Image: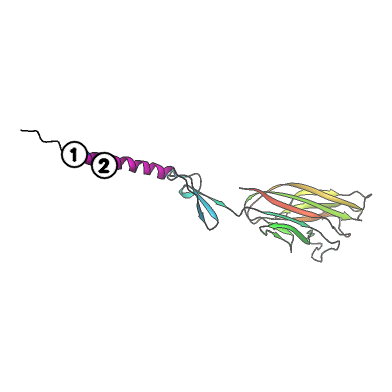
Amino acid sequence: MSTPAPSLAPRLVFFVGLLLLVLSGILEVRGQNDTEPIVLEGKCLVVCDSTPSAEPSGSALGMSVRSGTGRVAFSAIRNTNHEPSEMSNRTMTIYFDQILVNVGSHFDPARSIFVAPRKGVYSFSFHVVKVYNRQTIQVSLVLNGWPVISAFAGDQDVTREAATNAGLVMMERGDKVYLKLERGNLMGGWKYSTFSGFLVFPL
């Protein structure tokens, strides 16, 4: 009497279960380690850590948001020699009547004031020309009403001279910057003067 062949069903069930267990582990590891950018209304959401700690040091849910609207720059010039009627003895704001660059539209041409759209480090430079004026002038870059950078021009032997300076300024969102005549006058006008700035990097 022959011995019956062993059944293959138990072995098949065992190998199928083992295969499913291995595949589920691979998929779980891949889901934890893969990083896929998601574009949503101009923002790029990048999953940095699918299992953030209880006290995350970065953004909530282990995600960082990078905006595509970080380009900020302006450059304005004075194209005429006539003083604007808005420049009073009270404000002494130096106005510019032609805009060369205004990326982001954060420079207000009517008031010649730049308003920071976000916190960051900004670079500013200015070149204010006095014409046929023997008085010494002092021009300041004013941040929220306080002068932070100044320049002088006072050579009496030249018909044109410029007060020029540049520097980096840290600004908060909504901070305002403009040029102010702190000393002297610009009765001869300030044609060819320039005022420029841009965002170096956000904070």
Which disc number belongs to residue 131?
none
Q: Identify the residue at image location x=41%, y=43%.
A: 30
Q: Is residue 148 left or right of residue 34?
A: right
Which sits in the foreground, 7 or 137?
Answer: 7
Q: Residue at x 83, y 51 (%)?
A: 138
Q: Residue extending furthest left? A: 1
Q: Main secondary structure of the magenta part?
A: helix
* Label 1 sits on residue: 8
* Residue 131: percent from left, percent from top: 89, 56
- Callout 1, which amino acid? Leu
Magenta-drawn stretch contains 21: yes
Q: Secondary structure at mark 2?
A: helix
Q: CA distance from mark 1 to mark 2?
A: 12 Å
Lower sequence index among marks 1 and 2: 1
- How far from the left and from the top, in percent, is residue 47? 47, 47
Question: At 21% from the left edge and 38% from the top edge, which residue is drawn?
Answer: 11
- Image coordinates for residue 150, horizontal then vertical, percent: 79, 49
Query: Looking at the rendering, in which quadrant would you find the N terminus?
Result: top left
The amino acid at mark 2 is Val
Label number found at residue 16: 2
Q: Judge from the rendering whether residue 108 lies leftward or rightward of residue 34; answer left or right.
A: right
Residue 67 inside the magenta-drawn segment: no
Q: Which residue corresponds to the image point at 76% horizontal and 48% vertical from the top-left?
A: 149
